[in-house]
Structures are given as structure tokens and as C-alpha cells.
Amino acid sequence: RKEVEQDPGPFNVPEGATVAFNCTYSNSASQSFFWYRQDCRKEPKLLMSVYSSGNEDGRFTAQLNRASQYISLLIRDSKLSDSATYLCAVNMITTGGSYIPTFGRGTSLIVHP
Amino acid sequence: NAGVTQTPKFRVLKTGQSMTLLCAQDMNHEYMYWYRQDPGMGLRLIHYSVGEGTTAKGEVPDGYNVSRLKKQNFLLGLESAAPSQTSVYFCASSYSPDRGGNQPQHFGDGTRLSIL
């Protein structure tokens, strides 16, 4: 079982729809959680960090559920430009004692007219 | 600021050849990372470094070596390239989590490497 898991999708939604992605992680001691956006053949770019109390940035809302060990990303009023792959990243402790990010495989979102 | 710069952006090698990928960051980040990304596999960590002069193995280190002689540079070497190493390679850097708070990664724009 992979340490960080995401539904690969694709999620195919019409403009204006609300869509939600989940990302589960295996290590309860994980710290720091992130959502990145990756466009085709481009590098990942930070979309938002995920804080314990949940946080919102415009149409995007991220939440953390430590008890069930998952993070979520909600996108409201989807735009065509939201079409991309969304990667979650979870900082996990290594044998050397450092917290290093582990990525999920990504969820593909396609927003159509 | 340039951020994270990777060179080269594209390269074609023959099996058995060697090469070095260079990553440079100008943000004074302590941590640096090398990933490979293959279709359907997501980002897989090859090696990482938590500071100048230190390196550690990630999830898929075999066939690769790294060096971090200067804080701003992280080199990835392929000693004897194999077709299985055909991939897109991303370098990233971040502040240490010891600084507190969430410290996200900043990525270079990738190196597309083909091994024939």
C-alpha cells in the first residue's frame, strides 16, 4: 500500500461545478500537508498548504482530518483553467529523523464547457 | 530571483553513457530534492539533501548518485545510463521544517531525459 494515496480520476466536470478530492496518508505522525497543481509537461506548483483548522483561498478550500488521516481539496465554481493534475504531499519522518515530502500520484481534473 | 534552475532541459543519451544534471537554487533553502516522474507513477524521490555536504537515499536511488558540495547546488549523476532511466527529472528545494510552519517545495521546470 502506497503511503499517500489519491484517486487518479479523471474527474470530468462542467464549468461552474463543485468538485472535491481526497488524499489519504498512512503515517499518523505526518506533519505538514500540501496541495500542488501540475499542468501537462510542467513542474508542480504550490496551490495551498493545508492547516489543521482548514483554510480557504478564493474558490479553493483545503481541510485536514487527522483522525481519519486524510486531506481534502474543494474547488467551487470550476473554471476551464482549473483543468490540471492535483498532487497532494505529506511530510513524513524518515529513518534519519528528517521530515520529507511524499507525494500521491495525482488526481486529474478536466473541466469542460 | 531565478528560483530553482535545472540544466539541461532536454538530453538524449545512449545506454551506458554518463551524465550529470545540475540544480541550482537562489533562495538559501536548506533542503534539496531530486524526483523522477513517469506516467502513472507520480513523483518518486530519488535522493535528497538536508544541508550542504549531506545526502540521503529516497524511494528509488539505484543507478543514481548525488552531491551537495555547495548549499545552492544539488547534482544528480547517472554513471551508466539505462533505458529504464528515461523519465522527466524534477529538482526541488525548500526551507527546513525545523524553521516551523509549513515549508513548501519550489520546483525547477524539469529535465526530459531519453536513454536509447
Image: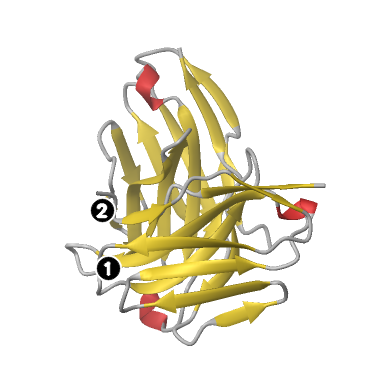
Label 2, label 1: how far apart the Cα atoms are: 10 Å
Q: Secondary structure at mark 1?
A: loop
Q: Is B6 drawn above or below residue A37 in the view shown?
A: above
Establish whether labels 2 and 1 are both on one chain: no
Q: How many numbered circles are shown? A: 2
Viewer-proximal residue, B90 or B14? B90
Name the residue tied to disc 1: A98
Task: Please provide percent x and percent y for residue B113.
Answer: 51, 27
Please report contact status of discs 2 and 1: CB closer than 8 Å, yes or no: yes
Q: Is residue B55 left or right of residue B88?
A: left
Disc 2 residue type (three-letter): Ala
Q: Which mark is residue B56?
A: 2
Q: Secondary structure at mark 2?
A: strand
Figure quadrant of residue A86: bottom right
Task: Please provide percent x and percent y for residue B108.
Answer: 57, 49
Image point 72% across, 76% down: which residue?
A58
